Image: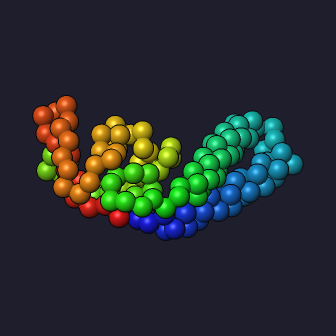
Amino acid sequence: MKKDDILIKLKENAENVREKLNTRRLQLVDADSAKESRFPTGRVELEDEIDMLQKKLVSLEEAVIDINSIKKSDGDAVSVGKNVKVRVLDEEMEFFISNSFADFDLNILSKNAPLVSKIIGCKKGDKKEIESGGYIEVLEIS
């Protein structure tokens, strides 16, 4: 997935979380004004969900900042901002390398992830040994 596509997806996810957060806040106000205010369990569950959604929204907003800060890198070596396809043992995987954000659902790995840190600076065709006795092979860089 390219940087622009990742940004679109992150912003969509953030907007969905923002909408859900607003809905839960309205439900909390309704719960406070209704008979349910005598039953704190529902209120506590809403507060917990609101707290979780707020943290998720902050995380997504930080991810947008992180991905936005990545400058287009020239060269043909594995680096931040590149899409990389690798073979680890007998399995192929493709991912985008960010500065610090990671999201497995979007195939984004941080430059600090063990797999990524092993191949930073590698070029297509390079192989690096891993502890399990196998290797990581860089198949594509874009």
Give the color scheme: rainbow, by chain, secondary structure or one colour. Answer: rainbow
Q: Please count the marks in the image.
A: 0
Query: Is residue 52 visible in the rendered structure shown here?
Result: yes
Residue drawn where x is 26% and y is 54% of the image: 123
Residue drawn where x is 41% and y is 65% of the image: 1
Residue drawn where x is 18% and y is 55% of the image: 125
Q: Position of residue 57 (x, y in %)?
A: 64, 50
What quarter of the picture does the C terminus occupy? bottom left
Q: Judge left or right: residue 99 versus residue 68.
A: left
**Residue 113's quadrant in the figure?**
top left
**Residue 36's quadrant in the figure?**
top right
Of residue 104 and residue 116, the one placed in the foreground of this image is: 116
Q: Position of residue 41 (x, y in %)?
A: 69, 36
Q: Position of residue 115 (x, y in %)?
A: 31, 41
Of residue 134 and residue 18, the one placed in the foreground of this image is: 134
Of residue 71 and residue 47, the one placed in the foreground of this image is: 71
Q: Position of residue 103 (x, y in %)?
A: 45, 50
